[in-house]
Amino acid sequence: MNSSTLKIIGNLADITAAQWDALAGDDPFLSHAYLVALQESGCATEQLGWRAQFITLWQNDRLLAAMPLYLKSNSFGEFVFDWAWAEAYQRHGLAYYPKLVCTIPFTPVTGKRLLITPELSLQEATHLRYLLLNYALQIARESGLSSLHCLFTDDTDRQVMQEQGMMLRQDVQFHWQNPGYLDFEDFLSALSRDKRKRIKQERRKVKEAGIELQCVIGEQATEDQWAFFAKCYAHNRSQRNSPPALNSDFFHRIGATMPHQTLLVIATLQGRMIASALNFFTNTVLYGRSWGALEFHSGLHFEACYYQAIEFCIARKIKIFEGGAQGEHKLARGFLPVITRSAHWLAHPQFSRAVEDYLQREASAISDYAEELNERSPFKRSEQQ
C-alpha cells in the first residue's frame, strides 16, 4: 500500500458525509450526521470542553482511516469516570487537563474507534489501526498532555490498544437479547414468575391511568414531536440538577438528517403529550438513549424506555437492545449484564503504575459483580442465555 498523508481535522464538515460514512458503516453514532450535529448545535465544542482533533489518513483525495479524537478540558459527557484520577493529579500539583479522548460525546455505546475503509485487506487495515493509534499517542506525548483515553472500544481496536501498552478498564452495562420472540407475551414467558408478574403490574398501571404510547420513526416524526422530546429531556436533566448535555437544535438536526435511524416513543394522556423517549436503531441493534416526563406516573418510565422498545425489537426482529449506561434495575426487566471496556495511557510513570494496579483490582471486582448479576438472572433457569 502506498504511503498515506496525515491530516488533523478540527471540523468534520470539512469531510464529505460519503467519505466519512464509508468508514463508519451503519453505526448511527459514528455517522457524519450525528457527529456534525453535535458540533454544529454547540453541544460538543471547544467552549464546552470538546475540541475536535480527528486524525485522518488519506491517499490523495481518498479517505483511508480516521479516529474521532477530542482534546478535553474536563471529563463531562464521557461515561467512563476518571474524576478521581484528575483529583489525584491536582493534589500532587499536576495538570490532568487537557487530555486526549477518543470517543463519541455523550454516547456510552461500544463501537469502532479506529475507523478503516472496508476496501483494504486485513493486513492493510491492521497496519492503519496501529498507525492511527501511534499518531494519537505521539500527539499526546509531543503536546505534553497527561493522557489518552479510548472509550467503549470494540474487540478489534482494543487488541491494538493493549498491544501498544494501553491499560484496559472494565464496566458493566445491561443489554436485552432477542433469540426470536414471537411477541411480548413470548418474552414474558421466558422470565421467572416474579419478574413476569412485576412487568405485567407496571404495564397495567400505565394502561389503567389512561396513558397511551406511540412509537414514531424519525421519518414520521413532526417538528412538534421533536420539540416536545427536547422539552422532556431538558426537564429530566433539570430535575436531576444536571445541565442539559444536548440541546433542542441537536435533536432537530438528527431528526432531519437521521430519520431512518431514530425512534421516538411518545406518551399521551387525554390527548396531551406527557413523556417521551429517544432511541436509535439499525437492523440488528436498538440503542436506548434519553427520556423525560413532564409528570410522574407509576410505571411510565419502564413502559416508555423499555417495554415499548422491546416490542419494537420483537416486531422488527432486532437482536439486541442496549439500554444505556448503568442501571441495575434493568436486570429485573429482562436485561443481562455485558462487560464494556476502554483503554488508557497516562504519561506520568508513577501515576500510570498506580492506575494500572487500581484497574487490575477494579477489573476483578467488576467480573465478580457481573457473575453475581448473572446468578440473579430474571430468566427461568432453562432460559439462561
Image: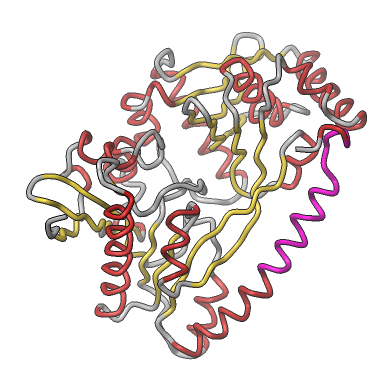
Magenta-colored span: 363-381
Give the vertical position of 138 relative to 196 (above or below).
below
Question: Which residue: 56% across, 29% down?
Answer: 277
Question: Which residue: 47% across, 70% down?
Answer: 344
Q: Main secondary structure of the magenta part?
A: helix
* Residue 72, x across and y down, in percent: 36, 64
* Residue 284, x across and y down, in percent: 52, 29
Position of 125 with respect to 183 (left or right) is left
* Residue 27, x across and y down, in percent: 41, 37
Question: Which residue: 67% across, 44% down?
Answer: 174
- Disc tally is 0
The quarter of the rendered structure image containing the C terminus is top right
Position of 8 with respect to 98 (left or right) is left
The quarter of the rendered structure image containing the N terminus is bottom left
The front one of 233 and 76 is 76
Task: Specify the quadrant of the image occupied by residue 309.
Answer: top right
Task: Specify the quadrant of the image occupied by residue 313.
Answer: top right
Q: Is residue 265 magenta?
A: no
Taking the view exactly as shown, the residue that stands out farthest to the top is 271
The front one of 150 and 239 is 150
Taking the view exactly as shown, the residue that stands out farthest to the left is 60
Position of 268 with respect to 168 (left or right) is right
Q: Is residue 377 magenta?
A: yes
